[in-house]
Amino acid sequence: MLKKIIVFTALVASTLSVTLAQQSNSFNFPIDKFDFGVVNEGDKARHTFEFFNTGKDTIVLGAENVRASCGCTTPSFSTDPILPGQKGVITAEFNSQGRPGTFQKTITVYYKEEVVKMLNIKGIVEPLPAAVVTPTEAELKKSAKISVEKTTINFGKMERAQKGVYSMKITNHGKDTLFISKSVIACSCGQYKLKKEKSSEELKFVLPGKSATLEVTYFPAADGYNRDIMTLYTNDPANLRLPIILESDVVETLQEKNMLQEGGTTAPFSK
């Protein structure tokens, strides 16, 4: 009798597990993270996440299904029934007023008492200066002018804890010396170096009409698709903050699995 009870309990647990997995798999989010980069204090940063109903049942969302991690983030969502195969959206809006510095917030999606997805937004809120001075046309003509080969760098597939390095040409097309004073990135997962072309010697500036090498190092922390923004602060009036988008697909390993391995153990050779 005890054996039958144990078998029945195991069967119920297995069925429940399959049911929950099916519910979770009904929500397919191609992208579940978003970096706003640098946001001016007072702005409302808004991003819309898309998902697809890959299950067999219609999805209906209510306020109890989509919850923000704090009062500074307001979620909104598709209110119409989402049929199998159809697309739905969840929008996260972050109010930056009075919140200078780095922020990382989540929107949790619940369905049938199960957490099916946690959406992540992040960025850096920068206080506005007391007075914003607009440069004159004459000043713009005399200023530094930055130009980079790419503003989006895709590092492709990367292993966990791997560092990606990408070098590209940076040119000063202006009439004043170009300086990069600093860089910021919300994930603390990237950095840059300014170097002489075809040299390992580091530079502090780029002279008018000259070029250099911008070496970007990226080490994303999360598995799956990552998109982070590194913002360079320059003395080019037209590009005081230059965002560089860094993308990658982080996987556990890039090595092909050994066909002799099953379930995390190595199968012995047959004799």
Image (cartoon, grey):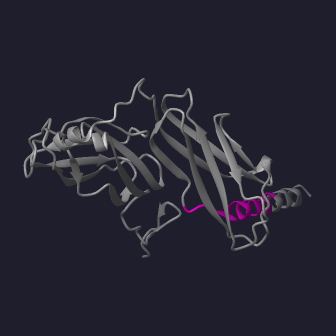
Give the mark count: 0
Residue 172: percent from the left, percent from the top? 16, 47
* Res. 12 image quadrant: bottom right
Q: Is residue 234 left or right of residue 85?
A: left
Residue 210 vertical placement versus 94 (above, below): below
Q: Is residue 52 left or right of residue 5?
A: left
Residue 171: percent from the left, percent from the top? 16, 50
Nearer to me, 36 or 201: 36
Q: Is residue 71 left or right of residue 145?
A: right
Name which residue lies at 69% across and 60% down: 24
Instruction: Find the residue positioned furthest to the right.
Output: 1
What is the chief secondary structure element of the magenta stretch? Answer: helix
Residue 126 vertical placement versus 164 (above, below): above
Q: Is residue 61 magenta?
A: no
* Res. 18 image quadrant: bottom right
Name which residue lies at 61% across and 44% down: 93
Nearer to me, 24 or 203: 203
Instruction: Name the quarter where the N terminus is drawn.
Output: bottom right
Residue 189: percent from the left, percent from the top? 37, 42
Report the magenta residues as a range: 13-30
